[in-house]
Image: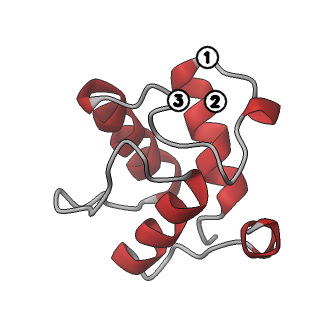
């Protein structure tokens, strides 16, 4: 099953304790307080749930939006895709 925007939001909500409704395509990694520890936990969850290996060389910053993050993941993995809901929300 391909990785979608909803999968990313679900994982982020699980590891941050945020409600999924609080995370939008325009939410930034800074908004979800993504630091190196959360990124490591996110990578672990991504690998366990979807078999996607989060590359160490991801081109992300604290200002990266969730929509952009999904697109970066899609570029890093052939099994990831940007869900239509992300594209329509931009």
Q: Is residue 40 above or below residue 69?
A: above
* Mark 2 neighbour class, 10 Å CA radius: few under 14, some 14 to 19, many 20 or more: some
Choose top left, top right, bottom left or bottom right for residue 22.
top right
> Which comes before the other along the chain, label 3 or label 2?
2
Disc 3, SS: loop
Circle 2 SS class: helix
* Mark 3 or 1: the one toward you: 3
Q: In which quadrant will I find the N terminus?
A: bottom right
Residue 89 on image: x %, y %: 80, 65
Q: Residues within 10 Å of mark 1 (few under 14, many from 20)?
A: few
Residue 48 % position (x, y): 43, 45
Crowdedness near tag 3: few (<14), some (14–19) or many (≥20) residues, C-alpha within 10 Å: some
The residue carrying mark 3 is 32
Residue 39: quadrant of the picture:
top left
The residue lying at 59 percent from left, 50 percent from top is 8
Q: From mark 2 to mark 1, how far is it between C-alphas?
A: 5 Å
Q: Earlier in the sequence, mark 3 or mark 1?
A: 1
Tell me: residue 56, above or below residue 84.
Answer: above
**Residue shown at 51%/71% (left/top)?**
71
67 lies left or right of 48 = right
59 lies left or right of 32: left
Q: CA distance from mark 3 to mark 1?
A: 9 Å
- Percent across and percent down for residue 79 are 49, 77
Residue lying at 52% horizontally and 64% vertically, measured from the top left: 68
Which residue bears the numbered disc 2? Answer: 13
Can you tell which of label 3 and label 2 is closer to the viewer? Answer: 3
| Label placed on residue 17 | 1
């Amino acid at each position: 099953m391909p990785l979608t925007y909803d999968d990313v939001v679900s994982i982020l909500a699980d590891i941050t304790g945020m409600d999924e409704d609080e995370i939008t395509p325009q939410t930034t990694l800074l908004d979800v307080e993504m630091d190196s520890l959360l990124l490591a936990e996110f990578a672990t969850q991504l690998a366990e749930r979807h078999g996607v290996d989060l590359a160490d060389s991801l081109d992300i910053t604290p200002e990266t939006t969730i929509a952009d993050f999904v697109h970066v993941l899609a570029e890093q993995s052939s099994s990831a895709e940007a869900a239509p809901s992300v594209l329509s929300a931009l």
